Amino acid sequence: MEKINSDYKTISEVAKILNLINTKTGKINTHTLRFWEKQFKQIRPIILSGRRRYYDNKSIELLKQIKYLLKDKGMTINGVKKILINKKTFELDEISDSSININKNNLKFKIKKISKLLKEIKKIK
């Protein structure tokens, strides 16, 4: 049977991408992905006949973030849920921070320019 679209990955393929492999047995841990689906409502694979799950690239990227936060950063499920819920506010904060930094740099430039002009004016007197 041929896959519907190469943009979609099966649960086994996603588990391999995320390196969710049992170190003792060497088997792929697809049950981890099923558990995460229940915990994180943002993960919505397409479920076709035979109850086969297919994940799109957006879901895979989200799963990568979840795995990173849970496994690498050691966060709790509730902590990751809060981050995913507030993700847009974090993005807005980053935008405002970068605009503030740009304004700070621009302000420093203007101050330097003004002080240079003042020095030139003092020389003229």
Image: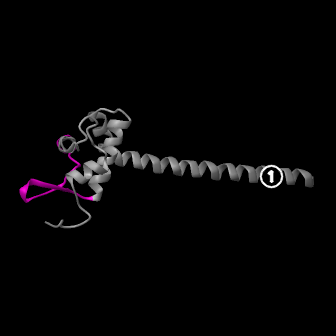
List x then y, in percent, for residue 83.
33, 40
For the point 59% across and 51% down, which residue is it?
103
Q: Amino acid at mark 1?
A: Lys
Residue 42 higher or lower than 72, as above or below:
below
List x then y, in percent, for residue 54.
19, 57
Work out which residue is located at the far front of the displayed protein and give it. 25
In screen coordinates, is 28 left or right of 86? Answer: left
For the point 63% across and 50% down, which residue is it?
105
> What residue span does the magenta drawing correspond to?
37-56
Residue 14 colored magenta? no
In screen coordinates, is 52 left or right of 32? Answer: left
Residue 44 colored magenta? yes
Residue 120 higher or lower than 93, as above or below:
below
In screen coordinates, is 38 left or right of 116? Answer: left
List x then y, in percent, for residue 48.
10, 59
For the point 20% across and 52% down, which residue is it?
11
User: Foreground residue, 21 or 99?
Assistant: 21
User: Foreground residue, 122 or 55?
Assistant: 55
Residue 62 higher or lower than 80, as above or below:
below
Q: Quadrant of the N terminus?
A: bottom left
List x then y, in percent, for residue 94.
46, 47
User: Foreground residue, 69 or 82?
Assistant: 69
Figure quadrant of residue 113: bottom right
For the point 36% across and 41% down, which residue is it?
68
Number of numbered discs on residues? 1
Figure quadrant of residue 85: top left
Identify the residue under disc 1.
116
